[in-house]
Amino acid sequence: MTASVKANPFVRNHFIRDGINRAIYEEMQLDSSIYLFGEGCEVKQHYDAPYILEAFPTRVTTMPIAEDGSINFAVGASLLGVKPIVDIITADFLYRAMDSICNTAAKQNFLRDRKTTIVIRSEFLTGGPTTGQRPEALFTHIPGLNVVVPSTPRDAYGLMLTALRTPGVTLFFEDRMIEDAEFNNNHGIWSNSIPWSEALPLGTSMWALRGQRSNVTVVTYGMMRQVVQRALEPYKFNHDYYAEDYPMLCDVIDLRCLYPLDWAFLKKMLERTGRLLIVEPDVRYGGAGAEIAATIAEEMPHVRVKRLGAPRATIPASKSLHDGILPTREAILDAVRNW
C-alpha cells in the first residue's frame, strides 16, 4: 500500500502524525473492536489519513462538540467490548473532560473484572492564553491513567500500537511544536526500506544522545528532546577541542512516557554520572520534573539535581513569546556548565 507524502500545511509534524495513523490503521485491520471518535473526526481523517476513512468508514465517527460527552460515550462503548480512540483535538480541551477522564474512565478497570482499553488522543499547540497549554503532568497523578508523549515518528508508531493493546486508559499526546524539519525523509512512514520497530512497551525510556565518559544525565521529553539534542550534540565526545569551552559531557534520555516512568533506566544512568538535569516543556512548578527530582533526592541523595522548565505563568498569544518562556539552548548549556 502507498500513501501520498504531500504535507498538510496545517500540520507541522506530518511525520509524527503519520506514525500515529499508521499504527491505528494497522491495529484496526487486526482488531475489529477499534473505533475512532471525536469532534470533526471524519474531516480530520479525510485530510490526515484518508486510507483509514476509506478502509473503515463505519468505524470513524464525528461526535458533537462536547468533550466530556465524547469521553463518557467512549467509556460506555468500552464496557460493550469496543476499544475507542477518542480524539480531543487539542490538549486545552481536556480541561472540559477532567471529570469524565479522571473520575469515570480511569476507575473502570478497578471496578470490573473485564478489563477495558481506551486511548485519548490530543495535541500540544503553540500560542496562548487558552491554547498551547500542557496538562500532561496533571494526569500522571491519577491512578488508572497512562501518559505518553512521543518525540519521534517511530516512537509515536510503536507506542500507539502498545496503547491500543494495553488495558486501561492512555493519554496519548502529539507534540505539534516538533516541526517536520526535525526529521529527514528517512522518517517517511510509507517507505518500505525503513525497518519500523514493533510495539514499544510503555514506561521505557531511550537514549537521545550518549556521550563518551559522560558526567551529566539530561532527562527530557516531547519537543524539548530536539532542543536539548541540538544544544548538546556537538559536545558528546571527549575531544580536547571542547575541553575548555565545554567541560561537561552529557547523556540525554527521552522519557517517552511520563507514566509509567522508566525509573530503573534513569537510576542506572545516574549511578554513572551523579548529576541530573531535567529539561521539561511544561510549567516547572508541580510538573513531571518535580516528581523525578523528588524521587531521586529521596532514593539517590548523592545525585545533584537541576531543573529547567516554563514559569508558572499564562502563555502569551505570540508564538515568539511562547517560545521565549521555554528552556533555550543557552539556558541548557549554562545549566550543564555551571555545577
Image (cartoon, grey):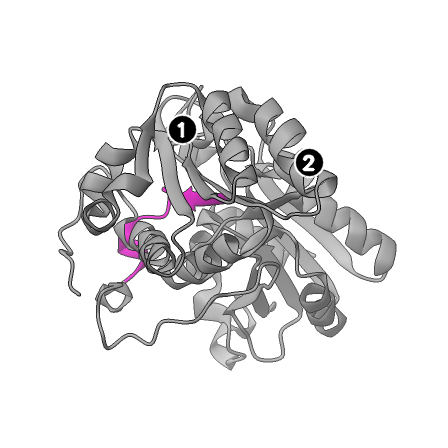
Note whether residue 58 is visible: yes
Q: Residue at horizontal 37%, vertical 40%?
A: 36
- Return the residue nearer the eye: 52 or 190: 52
- Return the residue nearer the eye: 260 or 265: 260
Counting from the top left corner in percent of width and height, residue 75 is at 54, 33
Residue where numbered disc 2 is placed? 107
Quadrant housing the C terminus: bottom right
User: In which image quadrant can residue 250 be found?
Assistant: bottom right
Horizontal side of 275 relative to 101 (left or right) equals: right
Horizontal side of 91 relative to 60 (left or right) equals: right
Quadrant housing the N terminus: bottom left
Counting from the top left corner in percent of width and height, residue 24 is at 36, 53
Note whether residue 134 is visible: no
Check the image and name the residue furthest to the front.
80
- Return the residue nearer the eye: 257 or 184: 257
Q: Is residue 300 above or below residue 57?
A: below
> Mark 1 or mark 2, which is nearer to you?
2
Horizontal side of 222 relative to 186 (left or right) equals: right
- Return the residue nearer the eye: 338 or 15: 15
Residue where numbered disc 1 is placed? 321
Horizontal side of 128 relative to 240 (left or right) equals: left
Q: Is residue 295 magenta?
A: no
Q: Which residues are magenta?
A: 172-183
* SS category of the residue bearing label 2: helix
Q: Is residue 146 above or below residue 232?
A: above
Q: Residue at horizontal 71%, vertical 70%?
A: 273
Gap between marks 1 and 2, in whole Å? Answer: 39 Å
Disc 1: CA contacts within 10 A as few (<14), some (14-19) or many (>=20): few
- The amino acid at mark 2 is Lys
- The amino acid at mark 1 is Leu
Q: Residue at horizontal 32%, vertical 33%?
A: 61
Counting from the top left corner in percent of width and height, residue 244 is at 55, 70
